[in-house]
Amino acid sequence: MTSTSESAIRRRARRHGYRVEKARGAEHSNNKGEYMLVEINRNIPVIGWDYDADLEQISEFLEG
């Protein structure tokens, strides 16, 4: 992946009908401290269910 900024990935996700959520608070079993990609219309996570996706994985998902 090229060095794409978080804000650029968020914009691209929005154009495709998704939003990027960043984990908040302390890490635990359902929060790995990374990101989740959520489909806006149905409010359903598509990757990173436990906030375990990184920006590279989200970028690759959006490209595919």
Image: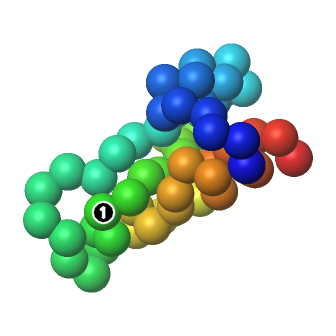
Q: Which residue is mark 1?
A: 33
The answer to whether 60 is drawn above or below residue 49 in the figure is above
Rendered image quadrant of residue 29: bottom left
SS at mark 1? loop
The answer to whether 43 is drawn above or below residue 51 in the figure is above
Residue occupying the far front of the picture? 3
The spot of residue 37 in percent (x, y) is 54, 46
Residue 10 in sight here:
no
The spot of residue 13 in percent (x, y) is 63, 29
Going by the image, does 47 lie left or right of 34?
right
Rendered image quadrant of residue 46: bottom right
Going by the image, does 9 lie left or right of 27?
right
Q: How many marks?
A: 1
In this view, the residue in front, 47 or 2, is 2
The spot of residue 27 in percent (x, y) is 20, 70
The answer to whether 11 is drawn above or below residue 1 in the figure is above
